[in-house]
Image (cartoon, rainbow, N blue to C red):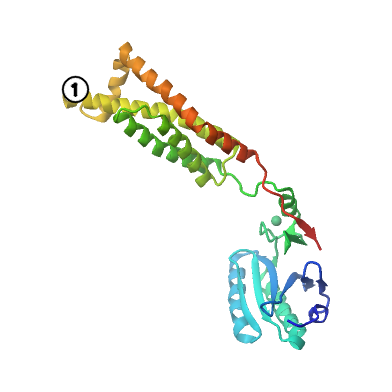
């Protein structure tokens, strides 16, 4: 592309050489235009959101006609979120006229369908400023600018879903505990799987594993280890006593309090649990420590530069 950006910019638009971006306002809408030298195109960026979704869908329908109506429009579409892009092929002398034409049309259609500038990060319709985020130009609201530059966590934790995920995770780990118990192992390694499953489940559904989430997972795991031990015991009772005394696995549970009065069995269960807990803590210690440190760490701050 062999053009002087100053001559290409629509009237009232400014070219920022350092950031390689043009910006300006047409009507009530603010636009960014990024020259893409290698493609010989300009990308017109419009961060906009409709007050109502029908306005936005009508606007997107209009976008599709752009390409058919103007031969210099290489592509028009949106990224599924806030960014609407129109790529205009460079025709040197005609560039200013073509860019102005597209921008004036876009601005008019925004007004017609009730679209307003919105923040590139949170999508909220509020006052936005021009800046580069790690050298990429965008329009951002004040809150998002603060958040990105300070590196505060971007993901929001959902505690309820996190707990549901953790319960599912520890249940999966418990199956291994019961299985290993049945073949005669003290299942310390399964204790690790229970803790791991809980934390992964929490992170998966809750979106983010915070320190509070880790505490919940560890407590759940400890409860579940005891639960798994008793399920294992009930299965053993069912197998040992046979169907004459115990009609089902569920029936076997009701025998547990009675049998626990026998010191030998109670001692056996206690020993299993103590050794199981120690092994589980030993195996999970570094995982918990690592996750704890991760949860405390801030997201890396982005480089924000206003222009
Ligand atoms: Zn924002």
Could you tell me which residue is drawn at 33 percent across and 11 percent down?
Answer: 263
Q: Seen in the image, is 74 located left or right of residue 169?
A: right
Residue in front for this viewpoint, 151 or 276? 276
- Front residue of this view, candidates 242 and 114: 242
x, y percent for residue 212: 58, 35
Q: Quadrant of the C terminus?
A: bottom right
In the image: residue 68, left or right of residue 9? left
**Residue 248 position in % (x across, y down):** 23, 30
Instruction: Give the vertical position of 157 relative to 35 (above or below).
Output: above
What residue appears at the point 66 percent right and 41 percent down from the top-left corner? 297
* Left or right of residue 18, residue 80 in this image: left
Residue with the most extreme left position: 244
Which quadrant of the picture is home to ligand 1?
bottom right
**Element class at badge 1:** helix
In this orientation, which residue lies closer to the viewer: 83 or 18?
Answer: 18
User: What residue is at 29 percent from the left and 26 percent from the top?
Assistant: 234
- Which quadrant holds residue 117? bottom right
Image coords of residue 138 (percent x, y): 72, 63
Q: Which residue is mark 1?
A: 245
Q: Residues within 10 Å of mark 1 (few under 14, many from 20)?
A: few
How many marks overall? 1
The one of 73 and 123 positioned closer to us in this rendering: 73
Above or below for 150 versus 191: below
**Quadrant location, the N terminus:** bottom right
Image quadrant where residue 33 sits: bottom right
């Amino acid at each position: 592309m062999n053009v002087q950006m100053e001559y290409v910019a629509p009237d009232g638009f400014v070219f920022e050489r350092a950031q390689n971006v043009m910006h300006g306002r047409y009507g009530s809408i603010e636009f960014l235009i990024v020259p893409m030298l290698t493609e010989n195109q300009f990308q017109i960026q419009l961060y906009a959101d409709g007050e109502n979704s029908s306005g936005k869908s009508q606007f997107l329908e209009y976008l599709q006609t752009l390409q058919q109506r103007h031969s210099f429009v290489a592509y028009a579409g949106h990224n599924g979120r806030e960014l609407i892009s129109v790529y205009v092929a460079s025709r040197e002398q005609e560039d200013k006229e073509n860019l102005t034409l597209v921008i004036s049309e876009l601005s008019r259609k925004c007004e017609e369908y009730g679209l307003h500038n919105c923040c590139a990060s949170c999508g909220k319709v509020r006052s936005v400023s021009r800046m580069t985020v790690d050298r990429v130009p965008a329009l951002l609201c004040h809150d998002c600018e603060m958040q990105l530059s300070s590196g505060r966590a971007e993901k929001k934790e959902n505690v309820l879903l996190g707990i549901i995920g953790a319960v599912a995770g520890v249940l999966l780990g418990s199956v291994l505990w019961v299985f290993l118990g049945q073949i005669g192992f003290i299942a310390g390694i399964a204790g690790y799987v229970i803790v791991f499953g809980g934390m992964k489940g929490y992170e998966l559904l809750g979106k983010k594993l915070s320190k509070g989430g880790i505490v919940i997972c560890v407590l759940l795991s400890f409860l579940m280890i005891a639960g798994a031990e008793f399920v294992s015991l009930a299965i053993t009772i069912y197998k040992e006593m046979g169907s004459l005394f115990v009609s089902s696995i569920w029936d076997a549970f009701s025998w547990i309090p009675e049998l626990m009065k026998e010191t030998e069995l109670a001692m056996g269960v206690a020993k299993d649990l103590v050794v199981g807990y120690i092994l589980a803590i030993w195996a999970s210690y570094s995982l918990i420590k690592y996750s704890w440190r991760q949860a405390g760490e801030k997201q890396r701050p982005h480089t924000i530069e206003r222009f």
